[in-house]
Amino acid sequence: MRVTRTLWRQHIGWTFKKHWKVQRHRVPLATGADLVLSQMNIPVVPAEDIVAPSPMRKELKFVGLEDKPLPWDEFHPLYHKQECHMYGNHSVLLKGLDQAKVLTNTVELEQGLPAALPRVTASARHHHLVNNLIMSSLVLDAEQKKLPKLKDPERPAFNFPREYGITDVRGTRLLTYRLIQLCGSISGSPRPVVNHTPVKVTLDRGGSLVQLGMRADQLLVAKTPLSALVDQYSASGMELPSLGQAHFTVSLETDHFYQDSDIYPTGSWAPHTLVLHGNQSEVYNLYETPVTEQQWLGRSLVNLFTVAAAYARAQYGAGVEDLPHPLCVQCCHTDGRLFHFVVLQLNTLGVGTELRNILWSQPRVALFDTCSYKDGQPVLTGYNSDVLDMLLSLYTHSITS
């Protein structure tokens, strides 16, 4: 065995233990603090009385800072005996536009937008700006997030590589915000806009309680509402569409827990134009089937009716049915490429009466054909200038209000 040289090193852990064995027997020195405190009439108690646990003390178990949630039973404050049919921001109606007309007591007098709506045409310079804002919103934005999975119907088990890019929610939001800002610049009189606000109204539709709730992505408001486009009795007695054996509440979820109240966010300011986003990642069918064209059109009507009804309730009270003055509201419903323009004249909130609400609906039009990268370069094809003209016509309608 080889003899090695002794290294004079210290084991820090061993040294600390030995040092603690010596220092732990130290007796605390009397500082006279208890005498000084007694002269100041401050009581002094032994530390053992404070540190030692009391035999009467109860052990408390803190789960968290929030209160424990109430059980969802008949004693919950939001429980109602009557079930309510819930329509949310993601909802679509099974029967589409026909079901929406029966639900909202609405008929169409003519196809297309009303003739009384002014027609405005933008210049070539403005259309060039729209091309730039489409590219900057849908292609050139810096967001890089995981996009939904790609699926091939013929090969459902095949996994495509995940793609990253701009989500449809952000792309649609950037596009509509910039289009509305451009319309305000063209008109010279920008309108007040409320972004991302909830709207809700609860109605009794022939004995069935229906709660319509939605998110107004952009709500253009005015001090006074738009004037009526036609006489409120011009559609009286017109027949509503037939749903066959289906009820007008089919495909609506039911719940006993709800808040029976209305929400209109802007007080006395009247709704002028609703800009509604219909992104594929947010709007879906309960039965996991693709959203059809008729369901898309029905969503435009129901959401526009929700905004108009909430304002009418805020102005005339919760018990109003036939409005003293007709209320006209406009809507632009888009998924970032397809645009649906709708005008609704609200005459009544009741059902089963001769008085009808009146709808004008323009078929969906595409703002462009494709907007993506091709061979490493951003490319926009098939730009349609009619979309900006129709949006500008809605924006400038009754510009003095």
Image: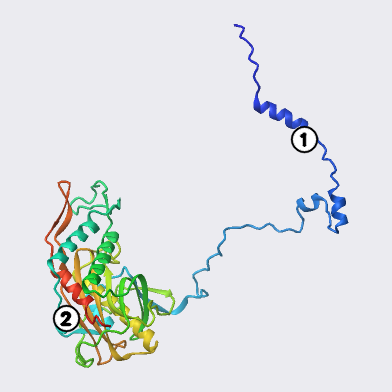
On-image quarter of the C terminus: bottom left
Viewed as shown, does residue 129 lie left or right of 201?
left
Please name the residue shown 30% across and 66% down the image: 286
Q: Give the residue number, with chain letter if any, for mark 2.
A: 118
Q: Residues within 10 Å of mark 2 (few under 14, many from 20)?
A: few
User: In the image, which disc is placed on residue 339?
Assistant: none
Residue 174: % across, % down: 27, 62
Viewed as shown, does residue 75 lie left or right of 334?
right
- Sequence order check, earlier mark of 2 and 1: 1
Q: Give the residue number, with chain letter if any, for mark 1.
A: 24
**Which residue type does callout 2 highlight?**
Pro
Q: Residues within 10 Å of mark 1 (few under 14, many from 20)?
A: few
Q: How many marks?
A: 2
Helix, strand or loop status at disc 2:
loop
Real-space Cα separation, disc 2 to disc 1, in angstroms: 93 Å
Please name the residue shown 34% across and 85% down the image: 312
Residue 90 vertical placement versus 210 (above, below):
above
